[in-house]
Image (cartoon, grey):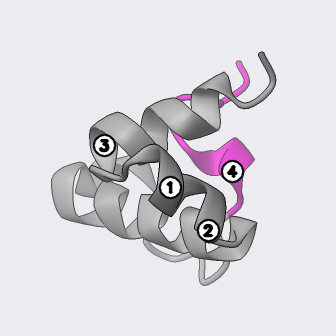
Amino acid sequence: MDWDFYFYVGNTLLGWDLEMFWNVTPAHWLKQYIMHLKANNPDALNPEKKIHFLDDTPFLRRM
């Protein structure tokens, strides 16, 4: 179940099928996810930061 979140983002948010999901690198997945967040939810990430990590995203933000 470790891949559920990653596949959910790839499948539902990015529109990838299973073959596309397994053929991309983790860095490409993260770049596409950040681009999706910037386009659809610009307030989700701090715009002053130049480097974003998965922990910065709304789904994994720690309280």
Q: Which residue is mark 3?
A: 13
Q: Position of residue 56 (x, y in %)?
A: 64, 48
Closer to the eye: label 1 or 4: 1
Closer to the eye: label 3 or 2: 2
Q: Residue at x 63, y 57 (%)?
A: 22
Closer to the eye: label 3 or 1: 1
Identify which amino acid the numbered label 2 is placed on: Asn
Closer to the eye: label 4 or 2: 2
Name the residue at the right extreme.
2
Q: Which residues are magenta?
A: 53-63
Q: Earlier in the sequence, mark 1 or mark 4?
A: 1
Badge 1 density bin: few <14, some 14–19, many ≥20, Cα 10 Å: few
Q: Position of residue 34 (x, y in %)?
A: 46, 64
Task: Pick the residue in front: 36 or 42.
Answer: 36
- Compared to residue 41, the image places residue 62 above or below, namely above
Q: Which residue is mark 2?
A: 23
Q: Quadrant of the C terminus?
A: top right
Is residue 7 visible in the rendered image? The answer is: yes
Q: Earlier in the sequence, mark 3 or mark 4?
A: 3
Q: Quadrant of residue 42?
A: bottom left
